[in-house]
Amino acid sequence: MRICPGCGAGVPDRKTAFCPYCGRELIDLSRENTDRKIREVKRAQSETSSVPKKLGLIVAVTLLALFLLLAVVVFLDIPGKMNESGMRREMDKLSGDMRKAYEKEDWDRLEQYLIDECEVYIESSDYFLYRTAWFLHTYPPLFDEAYGAHDTEEMLFIYEIMAEDYDMRFDDIFFSVYGTDEEIEEALAQEVERETEIMVEEGLEDEMYKLRR
């Protein structure tokens, strides 16, 4: 049965699209059409109501993924390793600067690194290695000049520097922390021994050993 929205007449003939009484388009009130309309409305409602659920699921999955990522970062100590890697690169750069200056025998540049920029380059595990090399280049000639001039004060000053550097090697921690070079270590030991013999010959034995207590 279809009802005319114009005059309200019922028209049982389903083949007629317009009211035979007033000519208005007819409304289909059949059960089949009504059920179809109801299904369409329910489907639209279902799709609409599922949107918040989908958003909620997306948010939940995203938060879970972030939590798992954070857990992995903490477990693997990624920030710590990145920081350690950065420090290692910086230490390698500092060591590389000193090594290049030493190999080129650029003692002024090496002095700049070891003395003027000590607070920076001391971070390198090779700092004392190259400082000893610079000491060996700088102080033995000055010691010999002081010895020739009988300048005992200068001799004691230089000897103290070389002896303190040498005595550092008797600390068990030294070789486990700082880099060394066999040739440089041997040269240091020989120089301290040479200066010690000269100091003893000059009668400065007591003053010399006071410096090393």
Image (tube, rainbow, N blue to C red):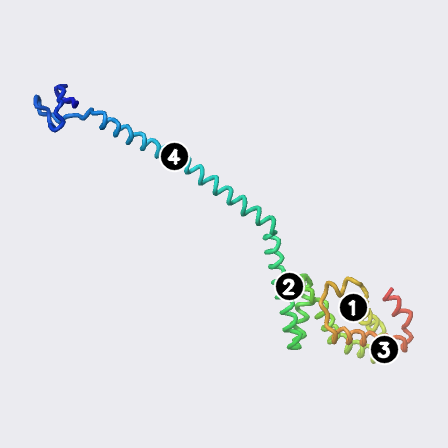
Q: Is residue 36 above or below residue 92?
A: above
CA–CA distance between discs 2 and 1?
22 Å
Circle 1: residue type: Asp
Residue under the point 63% across and 61% down: 88
CA–CA distance between discs 2 and 4?
58 Å
Marked residue nearer the N-terminal end (2 or 4) = 4
Is the C-beta separation of discs 2 and 4 under 8 Å? Answer: no
Marked residue nearer the N-terminal end (2 or 1) = 2
User: According to the image, label 3 marks what residue?
Assistant: 150
Residue 30 shown left or right of residue 144 in the figure: left
CA–CA distance between discs 1 and 3?
24 Å
Of tags 3 and 4, which is closer to the observer? 4
User: According to the image, label 2 marks what residue?
Assistant: 91
Residue under the point 80% across and 69% down: 166
Is the C-beta separation of discs 1 and 3 under 8 Å? Answer: no
Crowding near the residue tagged with mark 4, few <14, some 14–19, many ≥20 C-alpha atoms within 10 Å: few
Q: Residue furthest bottom?
A: 148
CA–CA distance between discs 3 and 4?
99 Å
